[in-house]
Image (spheres, rainbow, N blue to C red):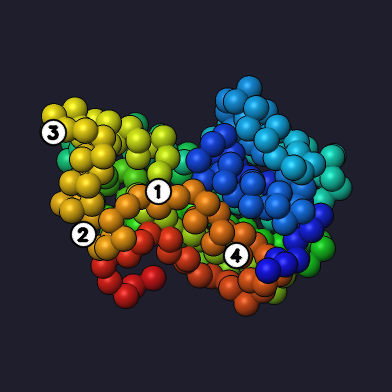
């Protein structure tokens, strides 16, 4: 399927490995030109070298508006425009009882998971508005609608992000900018690797047994009985930012293997 994004310019945050790199590969295969951002610039450049695309790598601290503005400017300086923003950067944040997690833990996660998306929109929307075409996709999570009790810091930030992007969709459709979220669950990544390493140690079992027990006990909705792959999420992202996705606006595309056990968005 031709997604119609050849030569489109895409900014991807959190592009060092994981979902960001998978999205970069998917868009590179479709002929897009890429501006990739992360804090680990050396690893980012190594990852970018794998891609068959025109690529700019830019280190950016997404908690700082000036860094985000510089990222947007790097796209304009190199390619003359911005068409697509894929915001995958984020952290899990502190875990624990919601009333025992400190203010600073909520604030740190809020700045990285939520306010960073506000900063990205501020920096990139003027260019997309001027041309009357744009795509803005943020990665949320199953936690936005199915929160887990000890992950309140993460839950709150992702729920707010989903609402923010829905708000943007209403206001920006008339400018030709389609705003959506993609929410994965239990994707194979360094983050879930760490979770399963910890579980295997706690339960005195193998890594694979930790995954199996986690699916059985903590994610009963995932009847596929496996972790998702980054490429499976990237395919949904690519559709949302494409010409083929021209009637997808204000939506949340779940790529969660059935983890959310309800019909809610």
* CA neighbours of label 4 inside 10 A, class few (<14), some (14 to 19), many (20+): many
- Disc 3 target residue: 203
Residue 134 at x, y percent in the picture: 71, 62
Q: Secondary structure at mark 3?
A: helix
Q: Would residue 196 appear left or right of 76 to someone viewing this image?
A: left
Residue 240 numbered tag = 4
Q: Earlier in the sequence, mark 4 or mark 2?
A: 2
Structural distance between the alpha carbons of marks 4 and 1:
19 Å
Answer yes or no: is residue 176 visible: yes
Q: Quadrant of residue 150?
A: top left
Q: Earlier in the sequence, mark 3 or mark 2?
A: 3
Q: Earlier in the sequence, mark 3 or mark 1?
A: 1
Residue 121 at x, y percent in the picture: 63, 52
Task: Tell us which disc is closer to us: 4 or 1.
Answer: 1
- Vertical placement of residue 81 versus 189, above or below: below
- Vertical placement of residue 121 versus 48, above or below: below
- Image quadrant in which the C terminus is located: bottom left
Q: Secondary structure at mark 2?
A: loop
Residue 220 numbered tag = 2
Q: Would residue 144 appear left or right of 101 to someone viewing this image?
A: right
- Vertical placement of residue 253 versus 15, above or below: below
Structural distance between the alpha carbons of marks 3 and 1:
21 Å
């Amino acid at each position: 399927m031709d997604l119609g994004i050849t030569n489109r310019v895409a900014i991807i945050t959190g592009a060092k490995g994981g979902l960001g790199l998978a999205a970069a590969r998917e868009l590179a295969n479709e002929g897009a030109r890429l501006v990739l951002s992360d804090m680990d610039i050396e690893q980012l450049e190594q990852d970018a070298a794998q891609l068959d695309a025109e690529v700019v790598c830019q280190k950016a601290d997404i908690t700082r508006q000036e860094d985000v503005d510089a990222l947007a400017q790097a796209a304009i300086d190199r390619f003359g425009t911005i068409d697509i923003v894929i915001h995958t950067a984020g952290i899990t944040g502190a875990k624990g009882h919601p009333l025992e997690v400190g203010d600073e833990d909520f604030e740190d996660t809020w700045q990285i998971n939520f306010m960073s998306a506000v900063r990205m929109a501020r920096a990139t929307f003027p260019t997309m508005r001027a041309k009357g075409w744009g795509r803005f996709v943020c990665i949320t999570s199953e936690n936005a609608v199915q929160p887990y009790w000890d992950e309140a810091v993460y839950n709150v930030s992702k729920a707010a992000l989903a609402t923010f992007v829905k708000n943007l969709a209403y206001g920006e459709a008339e400018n030709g900018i389609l705003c959506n979220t993609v929410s994965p669950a239990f994707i194979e990544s360094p983050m879930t690797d760490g979770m399963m390493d910890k579980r295997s140690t706690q339960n005195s079992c193998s890594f694979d047994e930790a995954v199996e027990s986690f699916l059985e006990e903590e994610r009963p909705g995932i009847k596929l009985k496996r972790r998702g792959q980054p490429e499976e999420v990237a395919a949904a992202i690519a559709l949302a930012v494409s010409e083929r996705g021209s009637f997808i606006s204000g939506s949340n595309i779940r790529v969660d293997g059935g983890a959310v056990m309800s019909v809610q968005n």
